[in-house]
Image (spheres, rainbow, N blue to C red):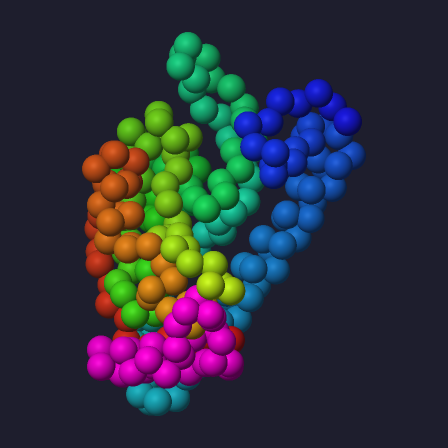
Amino acid sequence: RDPIPLNDRQLACARISSPEGQSYLKSMAASANYAWANRSCLTYLTRRAFSKVFSKSPQELDMHLIYDVSHNVAKVERHEMEDGVVKTLLVHRKGSTRAFPPHHPLIPLEYQFTGQPVLIGGTMGTCSYVLVGTDTGMKETFGSTCHGAGRALSRNASRRKLNYQEVLQQLNEKNIAIRVASPKLITEEAPESYKDVVDVVETCEAAGISRKVVKLRPIAVVKG
């Protein structure tokens, strides 16, 4: 309806102030709230399970929340443009997540000196990472970095090409426990279905848009 130039025919957009734009933002907020509530429930149930098995409280087990953040959402933010002018923008991060640098006013007090934590999930058979945001990322990518490795195979292609029993065997050889609702989920989320998370994280650090802090190893996987 509006003459808005697009660089991809598959993209759709609407002016933020239009009825469609406002409806989108409200729907997005509802989705983000749902996801936040879901993660809160998962955190509670996980703590309760560990507490039951080890007969200790979550506090005694040091099961505190490091960080909680939504991705694939749009945020109203202020950013400095190339001409030095600061503008208010709606930054839509698809396939990426916020990675604000140290001392940014929108990150919690606990992380003011380190930068915003960035949680990079690998696959159920490979490592994951915790990164932090940088000043370079703020200038080059509006304070954004990747939020995962990204798929190398579509879900349909993964189901066609991979054998779920072989994937289970690979996980067993790495001493990774798994509980899954359906065999098809195993192939869809197999390590071979995704790009190499190490290469992705190394690329982001080499570009200066985020910095590595911790490398994590999977020991258990639950797929609903």
In the foreground, 140 or 124? 124
Using the rendered image of the protein, determine whether residue 204 is visible from the camera's viewpoint: yes
Q: Which residue reaches farthest front?
A: 161
Which SS type dominates the magenta stretch?
Answer: helix
Q: State which region is magenta.
A: 158-186
Q: Position of residue 208 (x, y in %)?
A: 25, 34
Residue 169 among those drawn in magenta:
yes
Residue in view at x 54 percent, y 45 percent:
73
In the foreground, 116 or 143? 143
Q: Which residue reaches farthest top?
A: 83
Q: Is residue 179 above or below residue 199?
A: below
Q: Is residue 27 above or below residue 55?
A: above
Residue 97 among those drawn in magenta:
no
Please state the total of marks drawn on the protein image.
0
Residue in view at x 33 percent, y 66 percent:
191
Residue in view at x 58 percent, y 53 percent:
32
Using the rendered image of the protein, determine whether residue 66 is visible from the camera's viewpoint: no
In the foreground, 65 or 38? 38
Q: Quadrant of residue 167?
A: bottom left
Left or right, 180 with respect to 4, comes to left
Q: Position of residue 111 (x, y in %)?
A: 32, 45
Left or right, 101 with respect to 34, comes to left
Q: Position of residue 104 (x, y in %)?
A: 37, 33
Q: Quadrant of residue 20?
A: top right
Q: Is residue 69 above or below residue 179?
A: above
Q: Is residue 105 above or below residue 46?
A: above
Left or right, 144 with respect to 32, comes to left
